[in-house]
Image (spheres, rainbow, N blue to C red):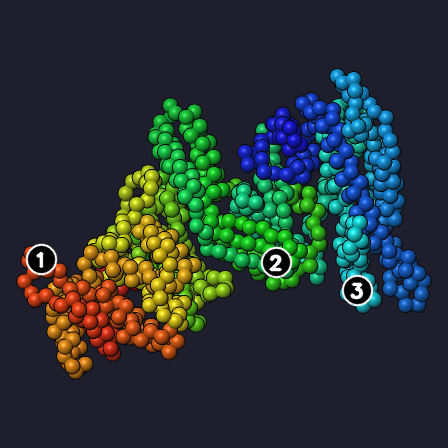
Amino acid sequence: MDVYQEAVLYLEEQHIPVEAESDALEEDVFQEEAVSCLLSEDIELPVTPNSLSWEEMSERRLVVLKSILESEEVYLRELDTLLMPMKALRASARTSQPVLTSQQVQTVFYQVPELKDLHQSFYSGLKDRLNAPVPAEDPPDHHQAGTKCRNAGLMVGDLFLKMVNQIGLYGGFIENYEKAVEVVRKCTHSDQRFRTLAESMMSNSGTDKARTAYTLEALLYKPLDRVTKNTLVLLDLLKTTPLEHRDYAILQEVLRLSHSFLSGVNESSQNRRGVTLSHGMRRQLMRDGFAVDVSEGERGLRHLFLYTDLLLCTRLKHSIRGKQDQYRFCWYLPLAGLRLRWFAGQEQTSETNIRLHTIRTKIYLLRQQLLQHSRGSRFLTSAARSKKKLEQMELMLLTHSPHCRLELHSPSGKSHTLLFSSLYEQEEWREAVYKLTLNNIETVPPDLLTLTSACVKLRMTQQPPLHNADAGEDEESLCGTLGVVIHSACGLQQPACVYVCVEVDGYNIYNNQAQTHSSIRSLNPHWDQELSFQVDAAQNLKVLCVSQADGQDDAVLGKTTIKLDSSTLTKRWRRQTLQLQQVEVMLSLKFCPHPLEPPSSTFQQPPIFSVPIQTLAQQEGVLVPHVVRCCVEEVERRGMEEVGIYRISGTTSGINALKAAFNSNLREAVTQLRGTEVNVVSGVLKLYFRELPEPLIPTELFQSLTRAVEIQDLDSRLASMLPLLQSCPDANRHTFLYVLHHLQRVSSWQHVNKMSTLNLATVFGPSLLRPPVAGVGHKGPTVDISQEVVVQVQVVFSYLQCNNLPVAQISALHDTDPEDETTHI
């Protein structure tokens, strides 16, 4: 059994809950939890489990003692570095131009020499004990003691007792600390000589004599940090000291004295109003809330506290038996120099999707049970049990569903990754942190134990957002199907590739986020894309407009939240204009209420490829299918200068993978599209037209078009060909026109991509136009197979030469309620 397992057993014995995910925690995290427990409750000291053998205990105790010795050595070097300038400053104080006065020297270095002597004596004594031969002490129930056992009998308790009896030195240092820091800051600002000294103190670190740079202020903080570490060290040593050992009772007393001193220090600290920072600032809590912290692939729900100078990540430990909630320290990052990177989302693995679906299904069933139990008083016990399970399921969902990633990178090299379930929430956190980093804040290293303990009183967000705790139906919320069509945007300062993300709140039983495809680089992007949501108790709709740029992070151009009002939403589309900072987004909404349905076991999107284009257009509610528009816009975004675009094909595996993505989930395909090789994208577009059951230009027009291309004069030829398009079905005609306009834009870059209109017609002609197949019912003349390709190419080539092609209409949305005027929000 390792040290952490012992810790878990101990906490369970004291009725302190330990979550299942704690398996991944390291020993030092447990130590901080134990100290926190000691400071807040009268808990008996940990008892060493009897399951460990004397030999195992001996080995672990020796490791702990050696680590204590190494830590003391580092601390002594830091104190030496801190004291190095003291003698020169005292000598300077007696001159006519002192760097510091004698009183200031006394304030800055108050109790530091005494602390150095105290720890030097402890270090020397501990080093001698570890190096000296120690007589073996018989372990219980054993007649022989091996070499390792000799160290288990090593007596060190008296050394710790001697040191803790002089711990009052730290009390004097702590009371004087803020005065010392104030002198350092004041003199650093006013005297160049002192500034040079205070900002460039060097210390040897380790056996390799590497040099480590410190500031004087950072070195002054070292004794404060040491006070907490002393208590943690004692806890660690007690865990590896057998009950029968002569040191055990002494170490218990040392821990009691240390605990008493530390409690007094923390009580004094909590009575202060705040910690003064540089430039007259004070550490204040600016924002707090919950997010998922990812470490070594493991996820954990954490409570974040954003202060004016640092970001603190903690773990909430709920109250038991009416006692106050507690927080355990996880990590912190100073905001000065902090770099942020964010990502709108990451693809979930199939295993994760199955897990999330299972959780959502259980949430749906538990909610239905609670709704039934609420109708009678006979099921109070069952309702309480279901409610508890419901909370557990949603906690799991809150932990495993977030996918919007925010990366934090500090100048010291430390990095942490946070996940948010909402892009809107992620952007609010990114914005808040980024604004504080602009102030170039100089951080005072915090007393982590005090700071973490104060979180209970300072927090503004009490609990994780558990919506399912109240399973009752809200009369003002929406349950049913919400349709959102994103039409267009305006107000951009410069041309950009833009997409719109839409999020709906609720009980999170269904997927509640979607985004449009990225637009072509434009000042006035158009999408006319419909997004559909199954909503469960939805009250708010959040909309974000995001700009994409190759090689750079996406940028949120604006965001807003609108209230979903069931009294104004109808089954017919209603158009609205949203103001997102400087950007205006035009959208339409409609709502169809119906009872909640269980989440489908597997979402089966109707296939896209090999489906008649009229059928697909009707399913999507558009005139130009999304697969065509997505591929066209992606090619125009980054393929216009690609040599041989549409002529040079992408890899077969890449094309098949993207085709499968479009056939299974359009949203995932849109995300995958951006990271796919552009020749693969162009290959998918060509494949879509080749696999249509009927060609884009109906076969009954082939003969008429064949006769038309024989007309020599181009204007006369086009005058004959353009009216033929009017007989095509709407989806065919508008898709064909949409592709023609795209190919004309591609050919305008032929000086770079080497794709002329004739080259493009040669590539697309056989895909867009096919001759009728001879057979039953076909009475017209057949076309010689040698001429077939010529006709296909010439038809497309002729249309591409037309300078006044009709404009393609993308959306089929015309059912906006005429009684509802366009509203601006």
Does label 3 or label 2 sit earlier along the sequence? 3
Q: CA distance from mark 1 to mark 3?
A: 95 Å
Disc 2 designates what residue?
A: 338
- Residue at the extreme bottom: 713
Determine whether the residue tagged by mark 1 lies in a helix, strand or loop.
loop
Residue hosting label 1: 775
Mark 1 crowdedness (10 Å alpha carbons): few <14, some 14-19, many ≥20? few
Which residue corresponds to mark 3?
Answer: 195
Q: Residue at x 58, y 50 (%)?
A: 416
Give the structural element (helix, strand or loop) at label 3: helix
Look at label 2 and name its amino acid.
Leu
**Residue 7 x, y percent position in the rendering:** 65, 31
* Residue 553 in the figure: left or right of residue 410: left
- Residue 651, by quadrant, is bottom left
Marks 3 and 2 in Cβ contact (< 8 Å): no
The image position of residue 466, as x and y in percent, is 46, 40
Residue 315 is situated, as x and y percent measured from the top left of the image, at 59, 41
Q: Does residue 817 appear to the left or right of 115 in the view shown?
A: left
Q: Quadrant of residue 251?
A: top right
